[in-house]
Image: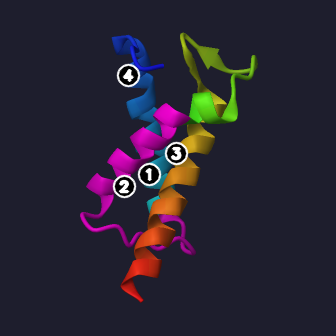
Amino acid sequence: MVNIDFLSFVYLVVVSIVVSLVMARLPKVKIVLPGGLTVNLIVGYLGAWLGTPVFGKWKLCTIGTINIISAILGAIALIILANACVKCCKK
């Protein structure tokens, strides 16, 4: 998973953008990461990148070496975790 091709990189960036924008528009999710949406995109990309090794490979939606469902779950999980850590550290 360390060596990914360019097309897989683009898929992860697209997943990160979509998940970050959807999470920013949800009324109950307040983005508290310093840097706002830019940092949210970076954290979402890292979560999408780690999503396939952590959540496993499902045969439903695999494009190249990237599993879309695992990437989406990883991006959501890491964005929520990062926001929770920042909220906790501010108190």
Circle 3 residue: 75
Question: Circles 1 and 4: CB distance less than 8 Å?
Answer: no
Disc 2/disc 4 C-alpha distance (Å): 17 Å
In the rendered structure, the answer to whether residue 71 lies left or right of residue 58 reads left
Question: Circles 3 and 4: CB distance less than 8 Å?
Answer: no
Disc 1/disc 4 C-alpha distance (Å): 16 Å
- The numbered mark, 3 or 4, whose residue comes first in the sequence reads 4
Amino acid type at image mark 4: Phe
Crowding near pointer 4: few (<14 within 10 Å), some, many (20+)?
some
Circle 2 residue: 40
The residue at 33%/46% (across/down) is: 42
Magenta region: which residues?
25-50
Crowding near pointer 1: few (<14 within 10 Å), some, many (20+)?
many
Amino acid type at image mark 3: Ala
- The numbered mark, 1 or 4, whose residue comes first in the sequence reads 4
Kindly identify which numbered label has been placed on residue 9: 4
